[in-house]
Image (tube, rainbow, N blue to C red):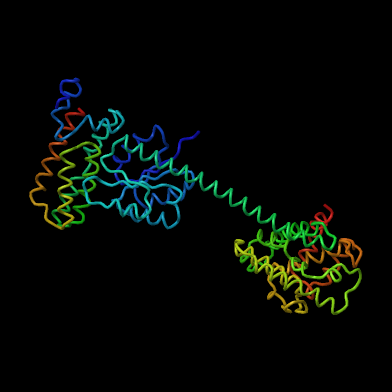
Amino acid sequence: MENLQTSEQHQDYGDFVPFINVEEGIKRLVNNRALYFKLLNNFQGRDFAQKIIDAANDKNYEAVAQAAHTLKGVAANLSLTALSEISLQIELLAKQSRDIGHLKEECTETVEKTLSLIARLTS
Amino acid sequence: MAKQKILVVDDIDINREILKEILQEDYDIIEAKNGIEAIEKVMHYKNDLSLVLLDIMMPEMDGYEALETLAKSGYTNKIPVIIITAAGGNENEVRGLELGAADYITKPFFPESVLRRVESQLELTKHRKYLEKVVHVNVEKIIEMRDNLVDFLATIVEYRDGESGGHIKRTRLMMEELFKLLSKSKKLEKEMLKINREDISKAAALHDIGKISIPDNILLKPGKLTPEEFEIMKTHSVKGAKLIDGMEGINPQSYVKACRDIALYHHERWDGKGYPEGLSGDNIPLAARAMAVVDVYDAITNKRVYKPAFSHEEALDLISKGAGTQFDPEIAEIFVQNGDIFKNIENS
């Protein structure tokens, strides 16, 4: 948050940070800002989270773990911090063949919040 | 210089795109979506490929399986594979490394770290290839030295009967040419598979090494040997094999075996009336059967203390007549049909 004062751009993205670390994401793409937003757009149209929910409803823990693993990787790579973290929690539970319980709702909420922020960023 | 090619294997396009963006300034990026595609691409690009970045959790064929397949076919020795794992999970990097991966990177990617790891693996591969080349060149040098020493030894023995190394050099060249021709023979196909042509032509130099043990009065006798003298002369094949058996630290075994076969059996005859063991037909090693023809041809066309030189045509005639009795008929026929090749060596 101390970056807030250093540049206007940083200020713009500051409040996204718990969900989307925009600066880090852009840096990962060797400062190709346009590509970062393009990839965020791409992510918007994908059903990574839905796969977790579907598998959880079927009590197919292996599939839950795999879907969570995939989302964890993509989300981390796009610096979708909150989503990556919740995916990790789900993955760890599912690997022990445990029900993901309330994390299911939390995951859905995080996805919704993240997607709405992406929509704001890319509009 | 063209950019080095890197294969990026990940089932998620977003992950591939991120790696591509990080790497594409310095490298040519090829993509694959799963293990099966990855193996196809590796097989397709072969040595053109410099490195593989391989995700572990993928549908179709996962990264471990792809890695195992690549390691089994020896690819991981030539092309470094860096596996992609996810930080914070309990994915096993160690398992990947055990399976032959050179290194690993974790998601989320950090451009600097990805680039450094890729670079250092490429550097290592370059150094390894350089060292392999140095070793290869030195092995070649050692083999060349071995061959020169062996030729030198054979020449020393040949000096005793007034030759000056010519017979050794000519018969080696002839064996080389003859085996090129024999490799096209359908009848000899099976036997040719078991031998190394290069070993045999080099081994030919030692065929008469046992003559070192034959006394001067027999070896240098002008005119025909008495039956007793001939018996002593005949021992040169067994003595030669014994000398070769005493060679230590000479490699490879296929070369030593070729030396021994040729020295011991080059006076065997196809009809079993030769010496020392009276072997017949293809019980006589192929190298010795070929040596018998070449040795006789070169002996006939050159002057010896006990005989004048005969013409090329006379020599071929004698070999034709000996086909099926003295000589392997297939080898004799091939030799005679390609007589000009051997005439040129004789006259060079």
Residue B195 place in picture, x, y as percent: 63, 64
Query: How many marks can you see?
Result: 0
Residue B212 place in picture, x, y as percent: 77, 67
Name of the residue lying farthest toward the left: A102
Task: Please name whichever residue, A20 or B296, is drawn nearer the observer in this view of the structure.
Answer: B296
Name the residue located 10 percent from the left edge and 41 percent from the top edge: A109
Residue B305 place in picture, x, y as percent: 89, 65
Name the residue located 24 percent from the left edge and 37 percent from the top edge: A78
Name the residue located 21 percent from the left edge and 36 percent from the top edge: A79
Res B222 → quadrant: bottom right
Q: Is residue B23 left or right of residue A46?
A: right
Whether residue B9 is situated above or below residue B73 in the rendered picture? above
Q: Is residue A37 left or right of residue B253?
A: left
Whether residue A17 is situated above or below residue B157 in the rendered picture? above
Task: Please name whichever residue, B105 or B248, is drawn nearer the observer in this view of the structure.
Answer: B248
Task: Please name whichever residue, B222 or A93, is drawn nearer the observer in this view of the structure.
Answer: B222
Whether residue A8 is situated above or below residue A116 in the rendered picture? above
Residue A88 place in picture, x, y as percent: 18, 47
Res B303 → quadrant: bottom right
Task: Please name whichever residue, B234 or B267, is drawn nearer the observer in this view of the structure.
Answer: B234
